[in-house]
Image (spheres, rainbow, N blue to C red):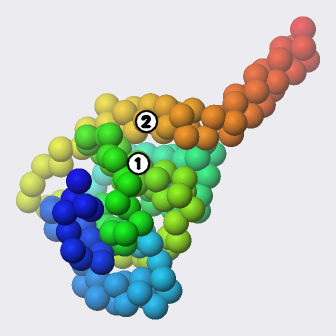
Amino acid sequence: KIFNETNSEFIFFTDADNTYDVSKYGEHKKIMISNNLDMIVGKRIYDKKFLKRLDRKIANKLFNIIFKFLIGGKFNDICSGYRILRVSKFRDLNVQSKNFEIETEINIFSIKNNLKVSEFEIGYKERIKSLSKLKTFSDSSKIVYFLLKQSIITFPYRFLVIFFIILALVAIINVINW
């Protein structure tokens, strides 16, 4: 809805918890314009002195692997909350997800519509004085479920090929062990 209500060429959003370094926003916007990009995603570089939750970093790595396997694309940080979007390219985006799956949905939309996307490293630090709403295991399962569902809906042939490869491997292992 917001994409149809703005007159801006770009929309910038980030998490409001002061964990993302937004100091390079101006530089990223210039890169976006000069390279005619449709979206920039901030690839988080974790500040080691603030990194308290190793489970979240591992979960993010797993999400990226699952995303590449089921959906494709060249994303290295699908859950990043730092993004600049070209409004004209995202007008048809009809966000269905409500929570931490939103970034994943935006990534899928960009792949489905063959948008020009680039990632740039940005500083990231853990929250210091507030608690996160993210519940690692329950929210992670929602993201994985969303990825599976979207891969079936958006890229059914890719999902079926992967499914049959796994099925064939299981059959081969069973025959060898028989």
Inspect the image, locate mark 2, and give the three-letter code of the amino acid beneath it: Phe
Residue 123 lies in quadrant: bottom left
Residue 144: x and y in percent read 45, 36
Q: Residue at x 34, y 84 (%)?
A: 29
Give the number of the disc on residue 6: none
Residue found farthest to the left: 129
Q: What amino acid type is highlighted by mark number 1?
A: Glu
- Please tell me how crowded label 1 is: few (under 14), some (14-19), or many (20+) other residues with Cα within 10 Å: many
Residue shown at 46% from the left, 91% from the top: 34
Q: Is residue 100 visible?
A: yes
147 left or right, relative to 164:
left
Q: Which residue corresponds to mark 1? A: 105
Left or right position of 80 against 117? left
Residue at 41%, 48% in the rendered image: 105
Q: Residue 91's spot in the image, x, y percent?
A: 35, 60
- Position of 80 relative to 11 (above/below): above
Does the CB distance between marks 1 and 2 fall below 8 Å?
yes
Q: Which residue is mark 2?
A: 146
Asked whether residue 19 appears in the rendered view, the answer is no
